[in-house]
Image (cartoon, rainbow, N blue to C red):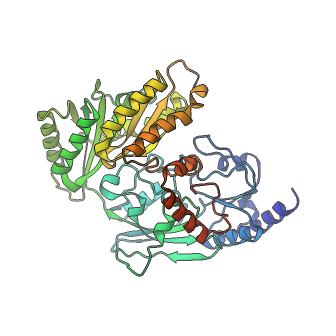
Amino acid sequence: MTGAPATLRAALAAVVGPANVLTEGADAEPFLVDQRERYHGRAVAIVRPGSTDEVARCVATCVEHGTPIVPQGGNTGMCGGATPDATGSAVLLALTRLDRVRAVDAENATITVEAGVPLARVHEAAAEHGMTFPLSLASEGTCTIGGNLSTNAGGTAVLRFGNARDLTLGLEVVLPDGRVWNGLRGLRKDNTGYDLKQLFIGAEGTLGIVTAAVLKLFPAPRTRVTALAGMRDVSSAIALLRLAKGMIGDRLVGFELMSEIALKLSQHHHAGSADPLPGHAWYTLIQADDSAADAPLSALMEATLAAAAERDIAQDAVIAQSQAQAARLWSLRENVSEAQRREGPNIKHDISLPISAIPAFLAQSEAALAKAYPGARLVVFGHLGDGNLHYNLAAPVGRNAADFMAGAPGVNRIVHDLVIAHGGSISAEHGIGQQKRGELQRYKAPLELELMQRVKHALDPRDLMNPGKVV
């Protein structure tokens, strides 16, 4: 190609080296398709900077050419937030070469890592110092810290430790004009003005590019107990959650919910899966951790489940007797998404609700969807402890999946209208990206949208940072 794109690519190659500017073919393709293969984009080039300075120089070069920038981490997002559009006018900045663990401060219980470090490596680095970073996701071997922060990732330990936002003390960010804001402070108390880092967490790269972060660490658990309970309904699961909070206390780390169909799908598509409690409508997976070696977690879990049985809350339960058994129980939950992918296309929702509103929402949405889409299969699972449900709809058996997927807007309208009616959110932990941008316009209050747009314009007046996403 000749002209401005060629000139821009040459300028970017001078920053990162020609080998780190990809333009076409098999090398470029993986960056231009989201992991769900729902969005396919094009780009002037895929550029792979290896340092914050190179990111800043790439951004400045793109600004000089008036070229939009799409940042990308591990490309594990669910809403197309890291995929460029089909015009081919943007530069995609792939940040996986920013892969250094810069420092571990055990005394301050912090770790400083670059944006391209996979989440699993953060876990490993923390473990080397007898500590843990509690953010836990099924994609942790591939997803990166920059992407986790850009979407304010949640996962299975939010009940105790909070989202990515709650685990972050400081950031380093390349701003839309190419300047670098160094906010890498490992302070738990700092009231010197606005907490600027919160602007960039959850912004999906629309306000700047996170290049490094200071994250909180915690003492590694030395006692852990995992249990699976069978329930007759979700109201019983909520009752068990309340009971567990009271009896196990703040050592309760995870409280996951699975419908019977979700569990069966997981077992069907993963040979050798555990089947300890067959025949229940709903299941809860419970985990408690303690950093003390002699914590009586097993006794507390047994007492909790015994009380639940006496009160007719839980119909049956099993406690893992080894780490291997615990891993098998967790695999039932962690394999649901992959099982759905193998089963075929499905209409996905990442929603959150006040926990008390979940039973009514489920009853009303199931009735409405059964009427509008007879035979459609509901696959419900998620993080009950923080009110986050993955509420998915698969095609009826025997129906063409593509035809069913064409009805996604109607399904979304039913689900999202009911979520909002019950005081919930249409995006709990996956972000907005390009998939839910129109939905955000429908459900956000006009004043909220105005304030978001004013922040966007103040930081990125030329709309070059990840355009077409979020706002």
Which sits in the foreground, 18 or 452? 452
Q: Quadrant of the N terminus?
A: bottom right
116 relative to 314 in the view: left or right = right
Q: How many marks?
A: 0
Q: Quadrant of the C terminus?
A: bottom right
Q: Is residue 209 visible?
A: no
Q: Tell me: residue 269, above or below residue 467.
A: above
Residue at 33%, 42% in the rendered image: 256
Q: Residue furthest right?
A: 2
Task: Tell me where residue 219 sits by quadrant.
Answer: bottom left
Q: Residue furthest front?
A: 446
129 to the left or right of 174: left
Image x and y of residue 267, in percent: 40, 28
- Image height of 4 relative to 261, above or below: below
Lateral position of residue 228 relative to residue 209, left or right: left
- Quadrant of residue 104 within the rendered picture: bottom left
Residue depicted at 15% across the width and 51% down the height: 296
- Using the image as rendered, state which of residue 174 and residue 192 is in the foreground: 192
Q: Describe residue 426's horizontal placement relative to residue 360 as left or right.
A: right
Residue found 60% across the figure and 61% down from its top: 95
Residue 89 percent coordinates (x, y): 75, 56
Q: Which residue lies at the image location 14% right of the left edge and 46% below the top edge? A: 299
Residue 68 image offset from top left, x and y in percent:
70, 61
Q: Measured from the top left, where is residue 448 in percent x and y?
A: 49, 60
Q: Report the residue that reaches farthest toward the bottom.
A: 192
| Observer able to see residue 417 | yes
